[in-house]
Image (cartoon, helix red, strand yellow):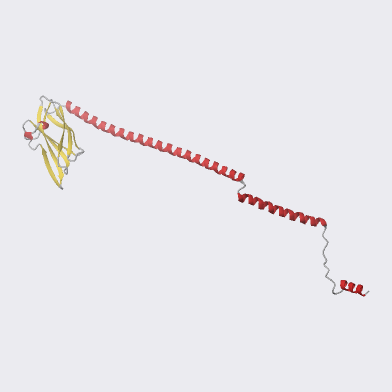
Amino acid sequence: MRRTLKAIVRRFGIDAPRLAVRPHMPWYWRWSGVVAGGALVTVVAWFTYDFGLEYAGFRQGEAVRLRAQLDETVRLQQAELAELNAKIAAAERQLQIERATFGDLARQVKSLAQENATLKEDLAFFHSLTATGKEGAISVNRFRLMPETVPGEYRYQLLLVQTGERAKEFRGRLQFVLNLHQDGRKVVLMLPEDPKGASKEYQVSFKLFQRIEGMFRVAPDAAVKSLQVRVFEGSSNTPKLTHNVNLS
């Protein structure tokens, strides 16, 4: 009896163990929590697996698709670049053709201008041949002085014309007077020095006209500034005609 009483006091007395009071939870809420937890674990496991695949390089399909897109973009850009280069090359060729055409036209214009000047000289020459005037009048036409490639060498050209009735043949000789610049000073040189002793090169004989062309040499360090031609008739010491030309 005493033992029974002690057991009752120990269970329900001050020394009795604590009693926890919990609210009652329905069974379906418990199962819902279990299902939600399982789903969360499944999702986390899937994302972890998917990230592992991507990190490990197992998503080859997506990488191939992206690479194909990049290849197509590069191909299109290269095609556009090739088209632009072709257009630029065509424009450059057209520009070269236009420049060549312009150069040809410029050369043609220059050639025509030279031909026109020559025709004018020819016209003046034929006018002088048919002109009436003092008998035995002499004129100098187309007088030119040109340097050669060798230093100190020069070439000259001129045309002697006799106008008027031209009753007789003109016989005479030429003398050239050169105005030089050498060592900072002016120098005068005569070819030939004595017109009476002129060689065959400087002798002339014609009725209507005579073309004269020749060459002379001076010191390589001398520069010819101008040239004068003197025309003597017969044995006269006084020139019948003088004509000057500057270096062209």
Q: Is residue 53 left or right of residue 149?
A: right
**Residue farthest to the top, as pictured:** 167
Q: In the picture shown, does residue 108 fall above or below 183?
A: above
Q: In the picture shown, does residue 214 fall above or below 60?
A: above
Instruction: Determine which quarter of the picture holds residue 15.
Output: bottom right
Residue 69 percent location from the top left of the image: 57, 43
What residue is rendered at 64% in x and 51% in y?
A: 52
Who is closer to the viewer here, 46 or 231? Answer: 46
Residue 248 percent location from the top left of the image: 21, 38
| Circle count | 0
Who is closer to the viewer here, 241 or 61? Answer: 61
What residue is rendered at 91% in x and 74% in y?
A: 3
Residue 48 percent location from the top left of the image: 66, 53
What residue is rendered at 66% in x and 51% in y?
A: 49
Instruction: Determine which quarter of the picture holds residue 178.
Output: top left
Who is closer to the viewer here, 116 or 5? Answer: 5
Who is closer to the viewer here, 22 or 53? Answer: 53
Residue 175 percent location from the top left of the image: 11, 35
**Residue farthest to the right, as pictured:** 1
Instruction: Determine which quarter of the picture holds residue 90.
Output: top left
> Image quadrant for the N terminus?
bottom right
